Image: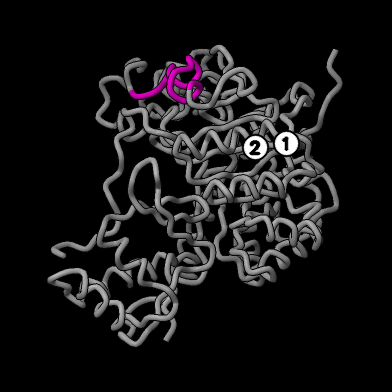
Amino acid sequence: MTAPFSTTGVPRLARGVKLRFDRSRERHVLLLPETVVELNGTGTAILQLCDGQRTVADIVAALREQYADVPEGQVVAYLAKLAERRHLEIHE
Amino acid sequence: MSEIDGDAAERSSTTVEGPLGLLAELTYRCPLACAYCSNPIELAAYRDELDTAEWQRVITEAAELGALQCHLSGGEPLLRRDLADLVRTAAEQGLYTNLVTSALGFTAKRAAELHDAGLDHVQVSLQADEPALSDRIAGLPSFARKIDAARRVRELGWPLTLNVVLHRQNIDRIPEILAAAEELEADRIELANTQYYGWAALNRAALLPSREQLAEAEVVVREAKERLRGRMEIIYVIPDYYATYPKPCMGGWGARQLVVVPTGDALPCLAAHGLPLPSANVREHDLAWIWRDSPMFSAYRGTDWMQDPCRSCDRREVDLGGCRCQAFALTGDATRTDPVCHLSPDHGIVEAAVAEANEERTPVDLPLVPRRERQRN
C-alpha cells in the first residue's frame, strides 16, 4: 500500500512489526524480522498514535495538542514512507 | 515540531554498545543434509547442548545487555523440545523473537504452542520451487511438508519470510521460486547466495554459480522487485566472491550481533568456531563480560587490528575489513583483508575459484557432499 492516500485512511503497524522502548539506548524503536528502526521523538509520537483506530486526520489533530507546529504534509509524507517500506498499513 | 524524520543516524561502530541481536543456535542437529549449510563440519563436537535453564539465562542476559531481537536458529531449532519455553522467556524480556526453521516438525500443535508463547516471526527455508530439486538439495523428502508449514505460518497470522539459499544448482529457478512465494503470499523472501562457511566451504566448487547465471538472476530479481513492490519484499544477496568490496560482516566484529552456539561458546560471527582465539563460553562467564571484555569479542572490534590495505582504506568504516572468518579460512590469518575485496593481496584465491566456476566444462550439477554428523576417530 503506497501513497497517495487520503487523510481518512487509518494507519496501523504492519503484521510482525512492533513498537518498543529500547531501555538501554533510551529511545523507541520499530522491530522487524531482521531490522531495528531507531525512532526520534517525533517519529515515536506519530507511531504511538497509529493504533488502527485513528485516521490520519485524527493523528494530526492529536499531534497538534502536543506540538505547536504540525505540518500535515510532513506527517503524511512520513506515514507514506513507512507504508512504502511495509512497516505500516494504511486502511481506507 | 520542526523536522520529521523517524530514522536516527547510524550509530558509530567503535563504541562498545550492547548487541542489537542474539543469534541462538540452539542445536546443530537437523533432519536435512543441505550441502550449503554454514554449520561447522565437526557436528559431533556440539552434542553437549546448553539446557533449558542455561539458554534462559543467556536470553535474559542478552536482553539486559541491550539486545532487542532473538533469532532462534540451528540446525533445526524445532528439535529442541523446550523451544516454546525459550520463546516465552525471550518474549517476557521484550525481545522480538524470530524462528529460523526448515519447518520439519512445525506441526499444528507445535505451531500453536509457539504462537501462545509469543513468537513474533517465522522464516521457513525452501531449497527450490519443486519437490525433485528441493528434496535432492535437502537430502530428504521435505518439500511438501515445507509448503504445508508455510501455509500454517500464514493461517496463524504470522508474517512469513521464505529463506532460499541460492547456488549453482538452483539459481536458474528464481522465477519459479518467486512464483511459489507469491502463491504462498509470503511477506518477504530472502534470495541469498551461499556464504562459504562450514559445509558450504567444503562444497564450494559445486555451489558457486557462473557469471552468466548471476547476470540472469539479477535481471529477474530487478524486474520482480519492481513488479512486487509493496506486496512482497525481496532481499537479494550476491555471492561475495563476485563483489568488488567485502560485506561488512555482522555489522562489525562485536558491534551488533552476538552468536551463541549449541555448546555455549559465544561468537561474534556464526563462522568464528575455528578462529585461534580463546573461547568465551556462557557456562564459564556472564554475557556482559564476554561481550565487553573477552578476547574473542575484543580482538577485531573497531579498526585498530587492521593491516593494509584496510588500514589506510577510505572504506575501512564501511566494509569493516569484511569477514574475519573468511580471511582466516582462506589465508590462515584473521587480520588480513577479506580476500573477496579486489584490493586484497590474496584476491587471487577468490579469482581462482571464480575462474573454475566459469569454465565451460564445469557442469551445473556437480555432486554435493551432504551435511551429516560423522563418526570421530
Q: Position of residue B224 (x, y in %)?
A: 50, 66
- Mark 1 vs mark 2: same chain? yes
Please identify the quarter of the rendering in which residue A87 is found. Answer: bottom left
| Residue matched to label 2 | B56
Taking depth in this image into account, of A87 and B365 the one nearest to the observer is: A87
From the top left corner, tell me how far across and down residue B63 is, in percent.
Answer: 51, 40
Please report, as a chain letter, where disc 1 is located: B
Q: Which residue is mark 1?
A: B52
Query: Magenta span has B290?
Result: yes
* Residue type at tag 1: Thr
Residue at the spot x=55%, y=23% of the render? B286
Residue at (59% x, 64% y) in the render: B159
Query: Dot 1, crowdedness within 10 Å: few (<14), some or many (≥20)?
Result: some
| Res B172 visible | no
Please tell me whether residue B295 is drawn above or below residue B150 in the rendered image.
above
Task: Indicate which disc residue B111 carries.
Answer: none
Label 2 amino acid? Answer: Gln
Can residue B136 be seen by looking at this rendering?
yes
Dot 1: element: helix
Range of magenta residues = B289-302
In the image, B1: left or right of B369?
Answer: left
Q: Tell me: residue B87, above or below residue B250.
A: below
Instruction: Give the answer, above or below, for where A34 lies relative to B348.
Output: below
Kindly indicate the quadrant of the structure image that contains residue B50: top right
Task: Reply yes or no: does residue B3 show up in magenta.
Answer: no
